[in-house]
Image (cartoon, grey):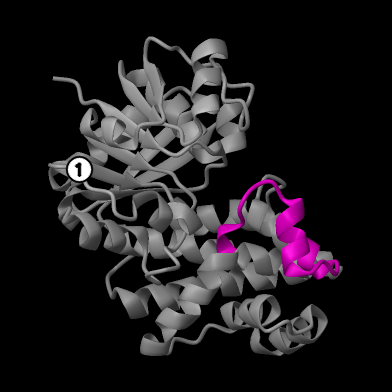
């Protein structure tokens, strides 16, 4: 029997995931918070706010603003809500049998109220075993999915059969997929690459060139590896697309909201002003505070993360912080 999917979220990444799933699945339930947006999709077959060029087949896509109904009617849940709103979305939420669902997180951020990666949040809140929790990661911008440009995703789950099932559901002409059992490593890396992208944007905004950017990103992947190994020691290849590939596209792409946010900070914007001007959330802003908090336990060496935190939360000068950072890189 074919599995039914439920996509939770209505932003650009959720829209892209709904598009990918609808290529192979006959029923994709899609939770959209705003009822007006639900009606727009039903009437015009497009998301009225994000990736407006994507047209949906309404015989396969079933939008609804009823979260409980979407979850109850779905076998596999894909959570694509911005990390800053995960707690608010699920606060006080109950649904009988949710612990028996398969859940994939596509959040790429930290739940700030918990200082926790989403996998741990859903495990603790709903009792879903880690063997039924997966992660969607890899170098894949929603905007390029909309344009049907070749993209790569890694599906991580401790149960590789579940990971492969999700990989098959997302794979299509323009999406290649692979699997992994490293849910903690891929999720933490997906969080930290947003911080590194902010650092890259700050340096670009300050006028640093490609040579320094190359040094920054080569140090960034080593910093990610140090922290991931401190939190979850395991054998992993950080040169794979789920780690290094995701970092590169987030740090360099014109579609990267974290890089854009950092670039604005580097050019002199205050944090609030940059946030107001952007229409989408830069996950790295919330992630850096949580990573700093988590690292109090592990005490890993995180010079780039420390510099971004001081710039964003302690209002230190980007010029001074990057000057100090230059001496810490090699």
Taking depth in this image into account, of 183 and 295 the one nearest to the observer is 295
The residue singled out by tag 1 in the image is 95
Residue name at image x 35 percent, y 80 percent: 230
Taking depth in this image into account, of 40 and 14 the one nearest to the observer is 40
Residue 215 in sight in this render: yes
Check if residue 264 falls in the magenta segment: yes
Taking depth in this image into account, of 17 and 274 the one nearest to the observer is 274
Residue name at image x 19 percent, y 46 percent: 160
Looking at the rendering, in which quadrant would you find the C terminus? bottom right
The correct choice, above or below, for 236 with respect to 160 in the image is: below
Residue 73 location in percent, x, y?
A: 23, 28
Which segment is the magenta one?
263-284
Q: Which class describes the residues within 10 Å of circle 1: few (<14), some (14-19), or many (20+)?
A: few
The correct choice, above or below, for 155 with respect to 34 in the image is: below
Residue 54 location in percent, x, y?
A: 58, 21
Taking depth in this image into account, of 72 and 201 the one nearest to the observer is 72
Mark 1 element type: loop
Left or right: residue 260 compared with residue 75: right
């Amino acid at each position: 029997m074919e599995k039914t999917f439920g996509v939770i979220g209505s932003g650009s990444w959720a829209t892209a995931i709904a598009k990918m799933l609808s290529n192979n699945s006959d029923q994709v339930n899609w939770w959209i918070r705003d009822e007006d947006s639900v009606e727009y999709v039903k009437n015009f077959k497009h998301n009225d706010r994000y990736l407006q060029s994507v047209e949906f087949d309404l015989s396969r896509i079933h939008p609804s603003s009823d979260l409980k109904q979407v979850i109850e009617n779905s076998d596999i849940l894909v959570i694509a809500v911005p990390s800053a709103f995960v707690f608010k979305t699920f606060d006080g939420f109950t649904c009988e049998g949710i612990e028996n669902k398969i859940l994939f997180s596509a959040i790429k951020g930290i739940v700030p109220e918990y200082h926790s990666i989403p996998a741990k949040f859903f495990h603790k809140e709903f009792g879903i075993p880690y063997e039924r929790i997966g992660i969607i990661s890899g170098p894949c911008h929603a905007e390029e999915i909309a344009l049907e440009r070749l993209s790569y995703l890694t599906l991580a789950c401790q149960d590789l059969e579940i990971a492969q099932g999700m990989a098959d559901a997302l794979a299509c002409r323009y999406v290649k997929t692979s699997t992994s059992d490293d849910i903690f490593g891929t999720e933490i890396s997906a969080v930290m690459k947003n911080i590194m992208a902010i650092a890259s944007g700050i340096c670009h905004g300050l006028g640093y060139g490609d040579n320094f950017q190359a040094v920054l990103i080569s140090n960034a992947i080593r910093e990610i590896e140090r922290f991931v190994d401190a939190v979850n020691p395991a054998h992993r290849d950080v040169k794979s697309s789920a780690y290094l590939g995701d970092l590169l596209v987030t740090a360099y792409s014109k579609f990267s909201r974290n890089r854009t946010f950092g670039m604005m900070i580097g050019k002199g914007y205050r944090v609030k002003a940059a946030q107001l001007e952007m229409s989408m959330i830069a996950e790295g802003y919330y992630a850096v505070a949580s990573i700093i908090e988590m690292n109090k336990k592990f005490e890993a060496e995180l010079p780039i993360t420390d510099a971004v935190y001081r710039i964003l939360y302690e209002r230190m000068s980007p010029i001074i912080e990057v000057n100090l950072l230059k001496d810490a890189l090699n």
